[in-house]
Image: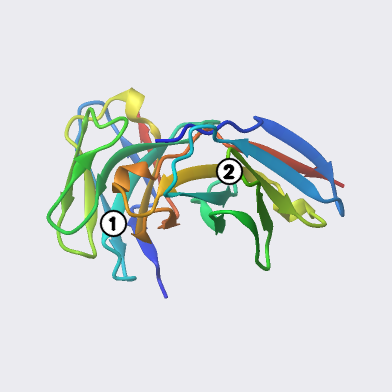
Amino acid sequence: LAKTTQPISMDSYEGQEVNITCSHNNIATNDYITWYQQFPSQGPRFIIQGYKTKVTNEVASLFIPADRKSSTLSLPRVSLSDTAVYYCLVGDMRGSARQLTFGSGTQLTVLP
Amino acid sequence: NAGVTQTPKFQVLKTGQSMTLQCAQDMNHNSMYWYRQDPGMGLRLIYYSASEGTTDKGEVPNGYNVSRLNKREFSLRLESAAPSQTSVYFCASSARLTEAFFGQGTRLTVV
């Protein structure tokens, strides 16, 4: 399993773009990168998933460099409601279900 | 759609009591998971079931048992609850490994 490293916490202000970077130096060829968001007292929610280059959806963008040893979740123009913990996961979608493991995540606090 | 439903939402147990946490999903997913989350911490995998009829240990299985009753249901049992098992328990299901859907959690307190 590829180990991931994220900042423990980040602060931002409303309206700013926020970039959260995750390091995964041991990522394997078949691994995908997935980000989840967790609000207090709720279960995590899938945000975005990618394999290489850039992926964008209505919520966020995911940037993955060519070597795939890191990835950056980009949240455009955050609001107070984006305050949450963000988790980066790396795993082979064809491998064991055990690979759905979460680290400590990044606590994002959006300030007014 | 209901998604993943967990019952109960809250529970208080005395040390040594037993209980079963129920989880059901209506998305026809093969894989189901049980996690615990302690205050200020990330999620830790207790048990998982890759498909109906199979279960495997995760990171922290001690003190727990699971049953994959059918494709929809995956239960977690505490045979003799301990204060160290005070936590929020999340059930999840997935069709693909890294896109999972979570329930709202069960907040368990063992006194």
Label annotation for residue A36: none
The number of numbered discs placed on residues in the rendered structure image is 2
* Residue at the image position 58 percent from the left and 43 percent from the top: A68
Residue situated in front as seen by the camera: A102 or A49: A49
Task: Provide the secondary structure element on which disc 2 rests.
Answer: loop
Distance Cα–Cα, label 2 vs label 1:
27 Å
* Residue at the image position 29 percent from the left and 70 percent from the top: B28
- Residue extending farthest bottom: B1
Indicate the colouring scheme.
Answer: rainbow
Relative vertical location of residue A78 with respect to residue B38 in this rendering, above or below? below
| Figure quadrant of residue B1 | bottom left
Task: Characterize the local packing of mark 2: few (<14), some (14-19) or many (20 or more) Cα atoms within 10 angstroms.
Answer: many
* Residue at the image position 48 percent from the left and 43 percent from the top: A90
Task: Provide the secondary structure element on which disc 1 rests.
Answer: strand
Task: Characterize the local packing of mark 1: few (<14), some (14-19) or many (20 or more) Cα atoms within 10 angstroms.
Answer: many
Residue B9 location in percent, x, y?
39, 51
Residue B105 location in percent, x, y?
42, 50
**Residue underneath mark 1:** B31
**Residue underneath mark 2:** A68
Residue situated in front as seen by the camera: A70 or A4: A70
